Amino acid sequence: MSLFDSEIPTITEPLELSIGCYFDTWIVAENTIKEYGKRKGFAINRHRVEYFKNQITDLAERVVRKRTYVCEYFGRYKPNKMNSIEQQHNKDSKKTDCKWHVNLSKPKNTDFVHITFIHSDYNHELLANNSIFATAF
């Protein structure tokens, strides 16, 4: 089943993430983390994924084993400067090297996804209306 093929449940209760929190599916986990970011004032991006070797779903998709989600400000700006000065665009980056990220895992013999690590420190302002302007991943 693709990450976007099923209906995403609405989250209405207060939301806190911690090590050991578990979710029924990757879809529910991603929706919960995105909602958490929206409520806190930042957007969430997918950063890294690891798949089970030699496991494929009925729809010929690889099975996700681990995934990392990061703050939209995660990382540092890496310029792709070209040689010609006329072709360069002087543009600032929103990257602030924010360390916020969450690691999730779905062990082989379990039916749930759980949080294995969360780094909850920010180094930027949290904006209440950020969900309006945030980029989708």
Image (cartoon, rainbow, N blue to C red):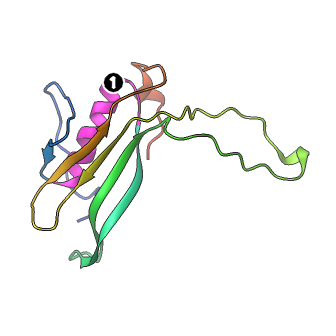
For the stretch drawn in magenta, the main secondary structure is helix
Asked if 41 appears above or below 50 in the picture, the reply is above
Report how many numbered discs are placed on residues in the image: 1
Q: Check residue 42 for magenta coloring.
A: yes
* Residue at x 90%, y 45% (from the top left corner): 86
Asked if 40 appears above or below 22 in the picture, the reply is above
Q: Which residues are magenta?
A: 25-43
**Picture quadrant where residue 59 is located:** bottom left
Q: Position of residue 54 (x, y in %)?
A: 27, 81
Instruction: Check the picture and name the quadrant holding the N terminus.
Output: bottom left
Q: Residue furthest bottom?
A: 54
Asked if 112 appears above or below 38 in the picture, the reply is below
113 with respect to 122 (left or right):
left
Is residue 95 or residue 131 the one in the foreground? 95
* Residue at x 30%, y 48% (from the top left corner): 103
Query: Of the residues shown, which amino acid type is indicated by label 1?
Result: Lys
**Picture quadrant where residue 71 is located:** top left
As helix, strand or loop, the secondary structure at mark 1 comes to helix
Q: Badge 1, how many Cα within 10 Å: few under 14, some, many 20+?
A: some
* Residue at x 53%, y 35% (from the top left corner): 97
- The residue indicated by pointer 1 is 40
* Residue at x 58%, y 40% (from the top left corner): 76
